Amino acid sequence: MFITDIRKEFYDVVVNQRVALLVSSEIDALCACKILQALFHCDQVQYTLVPVTGWQDLGTAFLEHKEQFRCFVLINCGANVDLLETLQPEEDSIFFICDTHRPVDVVNVYNDTQVKLMIKQDDDLGVPSYDDIFRDEEEEGGNDSGNESDGGSEPSGKRRRYDEGEVERRIERQRATREWEARRREILFDYEQYEYHGTSAAMVIFELAWVLTKDTKDMLWWAIIGLTDQLVHDKITHMKYVTDIATLQRHVSRHNHRNEDEDNSLSIDCMRISFEYDLRLALYQHWSLFESICNSSYTSCNFKLWSMHGQKKLQEFLADMGLPLKQVKQKFNSMDMSVKENLREVIEESSNKYGMKDIRIQTFGVHFGFKNHFLASDVVHATAALLESTEKDDSPGDNFIKALDCLSRSNLERLHGGIDLAKKKLMAIQQTVASCICTNLILSQGPFLYCYLLEGTPDVKLFSKPMALTLLCKYLLKAFVRSTRNKRCKLLPLIIAAPMDVEKRTVIVLGIPPESETSDKKNFFGRAFEKAAESTSSRTLHDHFDTSIIELKMEDRTKFLDALITLLS
């Protein structure tokens, strides 16, 4: 059931309990987890933190902890399946779910005792009404059997007439039941057809902190990063992003106003959050401007930097801005102050001439003391790179702890390390996109586009991770839409497959909706993948919390794709 009063129905319940925190391995969940940890520290709540990467992990974590805990808090996992069916818990276990995945499973919505959903009601949820999807079966069964047994003592003629009426009534009931079931299937299909994302979990937990009057600037910064993660990984519409930014901007103004009178506003280790109208260039303040323009999907796709013509266009663009190449190619921090002062305005002016009208976007920046300045998107890229690091043989658990660490302002070294990893990742994505476009690796399969990364591809290990593969897939589709002349292909969704585990011979498969300005970011591939796997008996593993990402045996790839083509045609 949905929680209406998050303080009374969630926090006041868990504050006296030992809590198991099961947190999905994604940035928004990490941020929500940081805020909740800070609240638990305030009130000395005992908790155990368990990172989970998929459904199997979640099941294992629950089995390990179900004896010691009664309260389970699930962050960004658990809302989009029937949780009680999946975990089979005891009757005294309670699950508090704060999850952005939509649609929310109807059984979770209408379970009043064990499943409590911390989900914003103003998201357009469209949950079917109770009577449309549940009905009392027992009454019908009871009526039928009762009438038959009564009939035994009646005279035979009377009984026949009685039976005829009863048979008709029963046929009528069965017909009504069949109609109801067909209608129910239709309603559930419409409701569960598309997967999409709702309000950031970090924002929901931050609102709890605000209601408890325990919100700090750090918590507000984590809420901002949670929302920015949804923008960077393209999970929400631009309209939703702007609406949520406005909500957070009010909180930022409140905190800044509160601190104006305090003495620490200029101390060395103070923290200052500011609303900024900044450039859509990845990590440009920690890189050179030139490399940032080359490796950001927005500018790279607009200039078509994978072609000679695109490279020439970029040089013209830099000349139009009047910035010396020497300045543009050195680290941003080392650029002349005279160049940096009105850099954003200069870039915006030239971008307008080159058709990049929305190169600036509403976002937030943070200053730690005098020296360190980060944009929210910088932290998202750094955290994602640490979370999916393939540099050393660290376990997912180790990466989770490192990513969690880099969100603390006491750990700026780790954040800078994450930014360096993120640069390598963005360069790998840019090079892979260029080689896929230049070698025509994207094929039109009829109802969708398809790209398979071969085993020998450089950095292919990086793309066995869901977030990196998602970024690559979105970037690749944008680039393809810019470079193709085929109008029909511009309207198609894209499926990408990359080697996952060479020894087990599995591939990771991901589908994204078509690229368009007005896209509602709803993804239909989750359902399609399930149906295709079912109809061909392909060996698939639907383990990710996002249903549009699956693992598949290499040998089954061809028949799985053929089934998808048939299904979506």
Image (tube, rainbow, N blue to C red):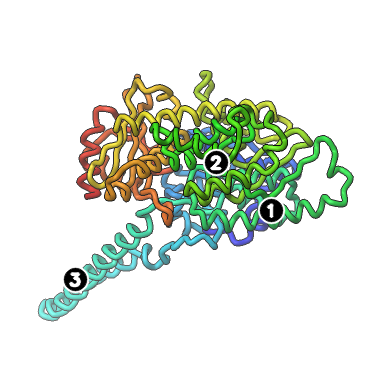
At label 1, the amino acid type is Asp
Q: Residue 272 has which mark?
A: none
Q: Secondary structure beneath disc 1? A: helix
Residue 317 visible in the shown view: yes
The image quadrant of residue 565 is top left
The image quadrant of residue 370 is top right
Mark 2 → mark 3, Cα distance in angstroms: 79 Å
At label 3, the amino acid type is Ile
Give whichever of 310, 9 is nearer the camera. Answer: 310
526 left or right of 153?
A: right
Q: Position of residue 78 (x, y in %)?
A: 48, 46
- Of callouts 2 and 1, which one flags the residue occurring earlier in the amino acid sequence? 1
8 left or right of 175?
A: right
Q: Position of residue 32 (x, y in %)?
A: 61, 44
Q: Position of residue 443 (x, y in %)?
A: 26, 37
Residue located 64% across and 57% down the image: 247
Q: Secondary structure beneath disc 2? A: helix
Mark 2 → mark 1, Cα distance in angstroms: 60 Å
Give whichever of 324, 402 is nearer the camera. Answer: 324
At label 2, the amino acid type is Asp
Query: Residue beneath label 3, please?
Result: 171
Query: Residue beneath label 1, please?
Result: 12
